[in-house]
Image (cartoon, rainbow, N blue to C red):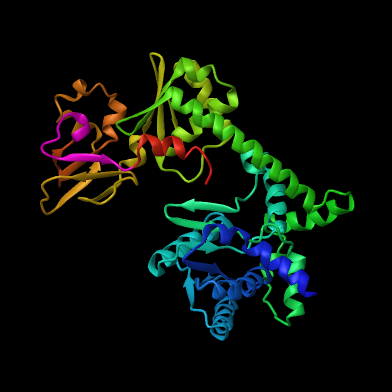
Amino acid sequence: MQLSEINRLVKEATALLSSLQPNHLGLAVSGGGDSLAMLHLLAPWAKDRNIRLSVATVDHGLRPESAEEAVTVGQICKGLGIPHKTLKWINWDGKGNLQDQARRARQQLLLAWAETEGIDCIALGHTSDDQAENFLLRLTRGSGVDGLSGMDPVRQINNLHWVRPMLGLRREELRRYLKARQIGWMDDPSNDDLRFDRVRARKLLKELNVMGLTSAKLVETSGRMQMARDALEHFAKMSAKACTRIEAGDVVMDSPALLRLPKETILRLLAHGISWVASAEYRPRMKALEAALGDMTQNRKRSLHGTFLIPGRNQIRIVREYKAVAEKQCGIHEVWDRRWRLSGQETKGLQVRALGERGLRECPDWRETNLPRESLISSPSVWNDADLVAAPLAGRPNGWQLQLLRSAEQYHSSILSH
């Protein structure tokens, strides 16, 4: 591989990171060809710019070789003078979708690692081949614009940037780079296991290439879908500001204004409102959203995705569903249901729980709040064992204050993908 070609790879792999200017960059390196190429491309670049660099390898513990592979990555990092840590996944119960749960666990382990180490940016080794495979997988599942727009090059969660610096590079050229430098890599046998959807998609892509439907064309289409998604999100954000408000943690929509919007925007706003109230990572499925919209137009309540959709006079209110929070409890000053915090006179043994019907009966002034029963029974309240101490939203604050940790502005801004 010529020097000019290597320089092109380095320029492509560092373009996004140069714009973000991280102080402490973390790399997720499995030992496979893609992530090892990322490590060797970025290490000298970071050193030249005095950017702290750390590496983590997630050991899922699903294969006997995984521990040894993590050790090998650690040895490579030691040779490069880069700190390395192995993050072990030990909590899988053997149920559910293995690859999905492994992905979620990987993200949580890397997030905890970043917080501990003071890392402000994590780079992942996905390539344009992964983008094409992702497009094909979503296509087989009937995804719309959002699903087909593919993986974001940069995504921000709180103060941490998740970056895919090599989405513009092919897997094949990264392996040519490693071979040219006589750097070996470790292939995961599961990458050839046809039980997994992604492996079958990879095989199908090879067959589609013969017909002219190449990975590059799928990536190009994915990019156009990204532009379409950006436009739809922008319009949805403007529409939300015109017809949506936040009240007591509920999302309240002006139904006449909402129903005048295009159906795609209506469903997008309903999905966002539901996900926001439920603090859900994923939006409801399209069929369930369409069924909920049908119920709203018929003035019927509906339970969906941990929320209750309540149609009323000229409005639709999305509230937290009581049964979704009935078992949630936490200590005073801790965050309850990922969005509420209570403060007041602290007494040992107090807990935050959902108010429930029994608690509501101990709030004689709850009707004066003008909030529906469904909102109040799922609202946070303070308890001393079986005794209700305070219920701020239900008209019984008793010196306690309730804070919603996400503002209306955050609601509107989070419509846009990050």
Q: In this rendering, is residue 239 above or below 226?
A: above
Residue 366, located in which quarter of the rendered image? Answer: top left
Q: Residue at x 30, y 45 (%)?
A: 327
Viewer can see residue 176: no
Q: Is residue 73 magenta?
A: no
- Quarter of the N terminus within the rendering: bottom right
Q: How many marks?
A: 0
Q: In this rendering, is residue 144 above or below 184?
A: above
Horizontally, residue 390 falls left or right of residue 69, namely left
Q: In this rendering, is residue 34 above or below 81?
A: above
Residue furthest to the front: 49
Whole-percent x, y for residue 130 in the image: 69, 57
Horizontally, residue 211 falls left or right of residue 201, namely right
Q: Is residue 393 magenta?
A: yes
Q: Residue at x 68, y 71 (%)?
A: 33
Q: In this rendering, is residue 357 above or below 94?
A: above
Viewer can see residue 410: yes
Q: Residue at x 22, y 24 (%)?
A: 369
Q: Which residue occupies the foreground of this view, 193 or 350?
A: 350
Q: Which residue occupies the foreground of this view, 78 or 373?
A: 78
Whole-percent x, y for residue 282 in the image: 51, 43
Whole-percent x, y for residue 390 in the image: 15, 38
Q: Which residue occupies the foreground of this view, 53 or 84?
A: 53
Question: Which region is colored magenta?
Answer: 392-405
Horizontally, residue 44 falls left or right of residue 379, namely right
Whole-percent x, y for residue 254 in the image: 43, 19
Q: Residue at x 62, y 37 (%)?
A: 229
